[in-house]
Image (cartoon, rainbow, N blue to C red):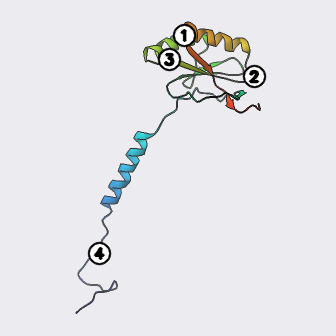
Amino acid sequence: MHRHSITDKGDQNLTIDIGPLLDVVFILLIFFIVSAVFVKETGIEVDRPSAISQGNAEQQAVMIALSADGEVWHGGMQIGMAGVTPMLKQQLRKGRSVVIIQADKHSMTESLVQLVDLCKLAGFGQVSVATKSGANG
């Protein structure tokens, strides 16, 4: 009986087929890309006030940000108060029914109330203000 060892240099070329490994890696990559949840951001970072009764409703909501300077942002663009109503009517046609306003805690209350009014006049019945969890702020 003749045994072959690893150091035996015979006619056999030993190769490792990495084709199936690449198939599995690409299938996993496609799975993670397809199952990823993309969150729509408002475009600016706001310092939200705190609230104990905070909930999580950002799935199918229209996100609007109100900066401390009174600037209104949506989808990474500054739209201003004048651009809120046309944008919301377009979102309403897409089937969205909830607006979440991310207002900076140093923003003027007058600007926030005006923004809430514009949302309700555009046809949105549910308008919420985003907060941080916890009572300390």
Q: Quarter-wise, where is residue 7 in the image?
A: bottom left
Viewer-closest of 91 and 17:
91
Disc number for residue 14: 4
Disc 2 residue crowd, few under 14, some 14–19, many 20+, Cα 10 Å: some
Residue 21 drawn at (x, y percent): 35, 59
Residue 117 drawn at (x, y percent): 62, 9
Extreme residue in the top direction: 121
**Label whose residue precedes the other's in the sequence (4 or 3):** 4
Real-space Cα distance between discs 1 and 3? 14 Å
Q: Nearer the viewer, mark 1 or mark 4?
A: 1
Q: Quadrant of the C terminus?
A: top right
Give the residue number, with chain letter if any, for mark 3: 97
Element marked by disc 4: loop
Cβ–Cβ under 8 Å for marks 3 and 2: no
**Label whose residue precedes the other's in the sequence (1 or 3):** 1
Disc 3 residue crowd, few under 14, some 14–19, many 20+, Cα 10 Å: some
Q: Nearer the viewer, mark 1 or mark 3?
A: 3
Residue at image coords 53%, 12%: 124
Label 1 sits on what residue type? Thr
Give the residue number, with chain letter if any, for mark 2: 106
Residue at image coords 23%, 81%: 11
Residue at image coords 50%, 17%: 97
Real-space Cα distance between discs 4 and 3? 62 Å
Q: Nearer the viewer, mark 3 or mark 2?
A: 3
Give the residue number, with chain letter if any, for mark 1: 85
**Label whose residue precedes the other's in the sequence (2 or 1):** 1
Residue 77 drawn at (x, y percent): 57, 22
Q: Quarter-wise, where is residue 102 in the image?
A: top right
